[in-house]
Amino acid sequence: MSTRRHLLLAVMLGLTLGCAGARPSEATSDEPEALTRVALVHGGAGPWAVAGYRMGDFALHQLGLPRGSFKLEVIHHSPAQVQYTCVADGAAAATGASLGKLNLSLVAAPAPEDTATTFRNRDTGQSLTLRPSASFVQRFRDVPREKLGEAGRAVLTLPDADVFEPVAP
């Protein structure tokens, strides 16, 4: 079997089995794995998809759920515009939520500033809603296509507060 096929199988196994261990730090510590997960779901690892990944990873740890849990519900609110919808793919990559499992949904929002993602533990009812931070939006709103990968890698190194913020209930 080729090295690429081994890597793909390892990543898919990781996505299937998940992991709910302690969150090592604010920034995602395993850069290659995070970028690979995002790229497998989204087709690339640009800043908005990586932000969604960071949000999903944070939410799993806050809700005490493993990746791939059917107990998790993810509802992404955004306008139907690339960048804002990319967040949903990143959240899916982090959490394992999907349309097919009926635990990921996209809800049309009227404006970019209404972009937010709600993560809910169906068993406990506990939820949190996160949105891209104002500094994130300003920094990554119009990244040229040829710089998307570089920008996505940069998002992995930023503190949580520079990527997303909680929305008050």
Image: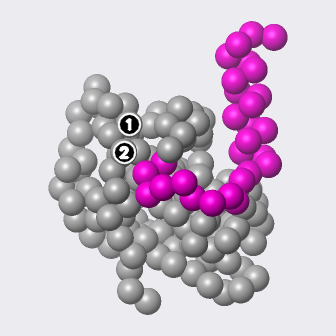
Q: What stretch of residues is rendered in magenta? A: 1-28
Q: What label sits on residue 52 in the rendered view?
A: none
Q: Would you name the residue on which mark 1 appears?
A: 153
Image location of residue 135, percent across then percent down: 21, 60
Q: What label sits on residue 157 in the rendered view?
A: 2
Quadrant of the image containing the C terminus = bottom left
Image location of residue 125, percent across then percent down: 66, 87
Image location of residue 40, percent across then percent down: 60, 35
Q: Is residue 143 left or right of residue 125?
A: left
Q: Is residue 73 left or right of residue 85?
A: right
Q: Secondary structure at mark 2?
A: helix
Instruction: Give above or below for 61 relative to 49.
Output: below
Instruction: Give above or below for 9 relative to 22.
Output: above
- The kind of residue on which mark 2 rests is Thr
Residue furthest out toward the top: 2
Taking the spot 81% from the left edge, 11% from the top edge, the residue there is: 1
Q: Secondary structure at mark 1?
A: helix
| Distance Cα–Cα, label 1 vs label 2 | 7 Å
Residue 13 appears in the picture as rendered: yes
State which quadrant residue 161 falls in.
bottom left
Taking the spot 43% from the left edge, 51% from the top edge, the residue there is: 27
Rate crowding at label 2 as few (under 14), some (14 to 19) or many (20 or more) other CA atoms within 10 Å.
some
Residue furthest out toward the left: 138
Q: Nearer the viewer, residue 64 or 164?
A: 64
- Residue 9 counted in the magenta span: yes
State which quadrant residue 121 falls in.
bottom right
- The kind of residue on which mark 1 rests is Arg
Q: Is residue 149 left or right of residue 32?
A: left
